[in-house]
Amino acid sequence: MWISQLPLVLLLSAVMMSLASCHTNMISINGNRGCVRHFPNNSPITDVNSSLMKCYGAAEPASSRCSFAAGETLWLKYYHSDSQPVDPSHKGPIAVYLASAESKGDGASWFKIAEKGLTNGQWAVDELVANRGDWKITLPSNLRAGNYILRSELLALHSAGQEFGAQFYVGCADITVTGGGDADCSPKVEIPGTQWVSGPSDESVKVNIYWPPITSYKIPGPQLASCAAASDTDNNSGNNNNNNNNNNNNNNNNNNNSDSDEKEKNKDKDNKIFQVDREELERMIGLRRQFYHRFCEKAVLELPADSFMGNFCSYVPPLAQQILLLLLLK
């Protein structure tokens, strides 16, 4: 039945690819690409429970390690094209985590050393675009010497008004830290995991950033690790307001989640979205999620980046993926 829709599907795919979103990823640290783990393409991850959230499926270490001293300044390079590192519309926060290499990033091993969200109306991504893809962080000065996995997390919120609309761009690198102290940085969380993001309705990933205008925003994940220089004004410490908000939100997380769930239930009772009832809406969302799980996440891990499905999952926006799926199943 779906074959009759194939010409339309291919046409719509071609149109969407020509209007491709400017996806992105970290490609180097201080100009060194060898320690950045291979990523199959720069397609976003939209399911906060996906195992790809850890290192975008890049479980194997990079071909080499970059060595840095504790307290050293690092420049992470994000890239999409020569003209821009990411589409300026992809507004959102940027965070950087570390985990010991020995842990392989499994379990509660990730601690946050850098974050920046919304400050005086400017998003971290706005600053990244202005800096042509260069993002500055500083390693904690008392970080224990050893081998680490560095994980960068850029979150685009331009479509985050619905569940599975927020787009994560995740990359990992293998580094060696020299000098430093003997700090055991905390808190540590599991990624993916509820202490990082509680679920697809978490306030950090389901948020309308356009209307009504927002003046504050909770960055996903825990507060900055205690070994980080929290008073520093560089990007690694974010800003005091964000830290205070993180502490308050973490302390009241259970209450907030409960209140949020109750509000969602009340809204769902009467709302009609384009005359689609709740059951139909849930079916559509479920189809979209199934499509991404069955095709795009598999394509990211197993298919060449230049294959049709590789290109489809990299460049066709998630909403278009849902439309195409519904056409195929019509």
Image (spheres, rainbow, N blue to C red):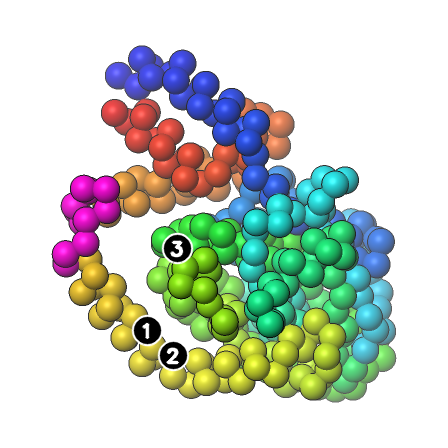
What secondary structure do most residues of the magenta stretch adopt? loop
Q: Which residues are magenta?
A: 269-279
Q: CA distance from mark 1 to mark 3?
A: 17 Å
Which residue is located at x 60 percent, y 54 percent? 170
Residue displayed at 77% across by 73% down? 138
Q: Type of residue at label 1?
A: Asn
The picture places residue 16, in percent across and down from the top left corner, at 50, 29
Amino acid type of the residue that numbered disc 3 sits on in the rendered structure = Gly
Residue holding disc 1 = 257
Secondary structure beneath disc 2?
helix
Residue at mark 3: 161
Q: Secondary structure at mark 1?
A: helix
Whether residue 302 is visible, yes or no, is no
In-image side of 264 versus 22 (left or right): left
Above or below residue 187? Residue 282 is: above
Amino acid type, callout 2: Asn
Secondary structure beneath label 3: loop
Q: Left or right: 287 with respect to 88?
A: left
Residue 244 drawn above or below residue 163: below
Labels 1 & 2 near each other (Cβ < 8 A): yes
Q: Nearer the viewer, mark 1 or mark 3?
A: 3
